[in-house]
Image: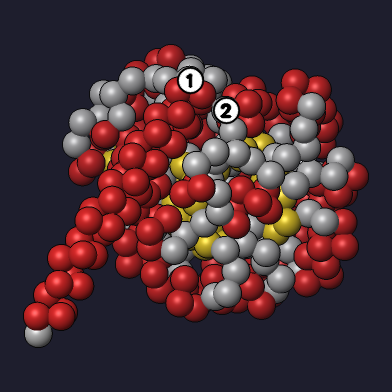
Amino acid sequence: MSAWLETELTRRLGCRHPVVQTAMGWVADANLVIGTTRAGGFGFLAAATLNTAQTRSEIEKIIAATGSRNFGLNFHMFQENAADCVDMAIDYGLKAVSYGRGPDSKTVQRFKDAGVLCIPTVGAVKHAVKAVQMGADMITIQGGEGGGHTGGVPSSILLPQVLDAVQVPVIAAGGYSTGRGLASALAAGAAGVAMGTRFLMSKESPTPLATLERYLKVNDPQQVRVTLAVDGMRHRMIENAFINRLEKASGLGRLLIAMRSAWSWKQQTGMSSAHMLSILFKVLKEEPEALSQTLMASNQPVLLQKSMQDGLPDEGILPSGQVAAAINELASCEQIIQEIVEQAEACLNALYQNNKQGQPEAEQSRRAV
């Protein structure tokens, strides 16, 4: 490993390269994490779309194939089996967990006591500061270029702001797929980069070919746009006929779609009616204005499943970073990471050599003055 690429991320996560494969529902399965791990990166298993038995099976599959527990588990605290995910991450001795809306301080302390690193993903400076106050060991910042739920601040602005605001290692996400991107992030002070879309468009990705072909057809970043129609929050995805129809639907129409999605998701996951009602009552009590948004949020897993598992890209949603427009082939995880590492090393070596060559000239100019 090049000295340029040995960072706090590689030291703390135990991977060879400062490249993280993010958790993506229906995509970041055991095979993708195995591919990432073997290639020297750090992978997160997406448990938000899995029940407890499935999550346990995927974790054991990764451990058996890699002989390592240097990978992470991603989950959401509003999952019915969130407590099981917490227990599994600790019981299996996984290296890290990632999440959006995070666990409480008591749960974070459980992770810390077990040596499991907490690496939340945020899209704003204030959320990064809050996450560190709650005990985050590292922070992943996702700029507005990133896929799925995303903020409105570009990575080039958000990264330096967060680096100035927190004292923990920061991982840059949103718009990264090349070694040049990794080199720029490291030069800015990041500990590494995290990528979702680049790994989704890999040979190890379980995404059906019909859906992957839609990603490969994107050649203009403007085709990967933000919509509020899925759940009322900023959601970046590839434009398709379904999103156009959803955006044109009335508020009542969207709500009915969301209710159908919620019922479908309840049946698939075995979620109890009591748990579903408890979530709604909690929202009514704490954030009554967010009730509609909470109902609409049930759209995502069902619509995601249609494209990412069923292979029906026109009947579901296609979360994607704008960087999809710069990717024109499906490569293996090994090829992806190796090319990124080699290009980053070349960029950083060239920068060092240029600076080194310029030093004598600068010194001569200084003396002349």
* Amino acid type shown at disc 2: Ala
Q: Is residue 231 above or below residue 2?
A: below
Left or right of 48: which side holds 69? right
Residue at the top extreme? 209
Q: Nearer the viewer, residue 225 or 168?
A: 168
Left or right of 55: which side holds 369? left
Q: What number is the disc on residue 5?
A: none
Residue 278 percent across, percent down from the top left: 77, 60
* Amino acid type shown at disc 1: Ser
**Mark 1–mark 2 contact, CB under 8 Å?**
yes
Residue at the right extreme? 91
- The quadrant where residue 286 appears: bottom right
How many marks the image carries: the answer is 2
Left or right of 367: which side holds 206? right
Dot 2 lies on which element? loop
Residue at the left extreme? 368
Q: Residues within 10 Å of mark 2 (few under 14, many from 20)?
A: many
Left or right of 36: which side holds 273? right
Q: Is residue 106 above or below residue 6?
A: below
Residue 199 percent across, percent down from the top left: 48, 31
The residue at 71%/71% (across/down) is 135
The answer to whether any part of residue 331 appears in the image is yes
- The quadrant where residue 71 appears: top right
- The quadrant where residue 33 appears: top right
Q: Is residue 61 above or below residue 47?
A: above
Which residue is identified by label 1?
332
Which residue is identified by label 2?
39
The answer to whether any part of residue 247 appears in the image is no
Q: Quadrant of the N terminus?
A: top right
